[in-house]
Amino acid sequence: MKEGAILATNTSSIPLQDLRSTLAKPERLLGLHFFNPVSRLQLVEVVSHDGNSSDMLKAALAFVGAIDRLPLPVKSSPGFLVNRALTPYMLEAMVMLDEKIDKSVIDAAAEKFGMPMGPIELADQVGLDICLAVGDMLRSKFGDLLPPTPAWLREKVAKGELGRKTGKGFYVWKDGKADKHMAAPSAAQPSPEMIDRLVLPMSNVCVACLREGIVDNPDTVDGAMIFGTGYAPFRGGPLNYARTRGPENVVSALRALAQKFGDRFAPDAGWENFK
């Protein structure tokens, strides 16, 4: 590599501290995490670790701006910001599948909240192999703070049913679109509790990332979640939604979910100082 060149990784979740250990010049390593589909999503997480110089970080941020993308500076941590917040959303949906809730109802719950697509369809879009790898990595770091990864997801990946890119995952995909007509219609309707199970963990993780200093600005967090995940724009992002709903209400709802479904819903300590 040329002297002074930046070595950038597009990893979506692996902490840079885990990747830099064998590098002769670890200070060169940065993360430039693009989001899929790259042609449609403008956000790029610019991930730094404690060995980077401020000049190298500025150069990386400038590069992202020069290619007409929106740079989000984040400190290295498992999943960074966006995937750390998005993974519980998709894994919780898979827990609901284990509870025999129909996938169309799960997706309808998220769409009712305002998401552009539900978590089951999104998992197919991302790729079930990617979902599995990210879920495993984050659970290795955060344990039971995340929903469990179901065994049948490994079986689907082993069979090559990876979602959109292989033509079959949770849905059958034709011409780049999920064929939802094949699914049997369900008379069930999404409940407010289902919606809370999907969306409140995202707010909880965003509060945790603020508390941990992964990101330093709540407005930046909200913008990143909207541009990186399509989080319901009219809600203003996970933190603005919590602010609008009322932090006390959100914490109370999380505690009720934790009592019913487990500690993965336990409110983060950062809510004490959230305004």
Image (spheres, helix red, strand yellow):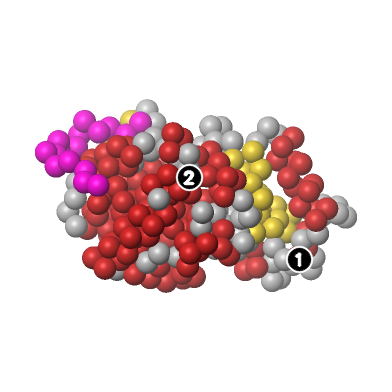
In what element is the residue under mark 1? loop
Nearer-the-camera pick, 150 or 217: 217
Crowding at dot 1, Cα within 10 Å, few <14 / some 14-19 / many 20+, comes out as some
Residue shown at 26% from the left, 68% from the top: 259
Q: Which mark is residue 51?
A: 1
Instruction: Name the quadrant containing residue 118.
Output: top left
Give residue 99's position: percent from left, percent from top.
19, 57
Does the rendering let one see residue 97?
A: yes
Instruction: Name the quadrant containing residue 120.
Output: top left
Q: Which mark is residue 240?
A: 2
Left-right relation of 10 to 8: left
Residue shown at 32% from the left, 64% from the top: 255
Q: Which mark is residue 265?
A: none
Left-right relation of 191 to 5: left
Nearer-the-camera pick, 21 or 49: 49
Quarter holding the N terminus is: bottom right
What amino acid is labelled 1 in the image? Gly
Left-right relation of 203 to 112: right
What amino acid is labelled 2 in the image? Asn
Residue shown at 77% from the left, 61% from the top: 52
Give residue 172's position: percent from left, percent from top.
29, 38
Region in magenta: 177-192
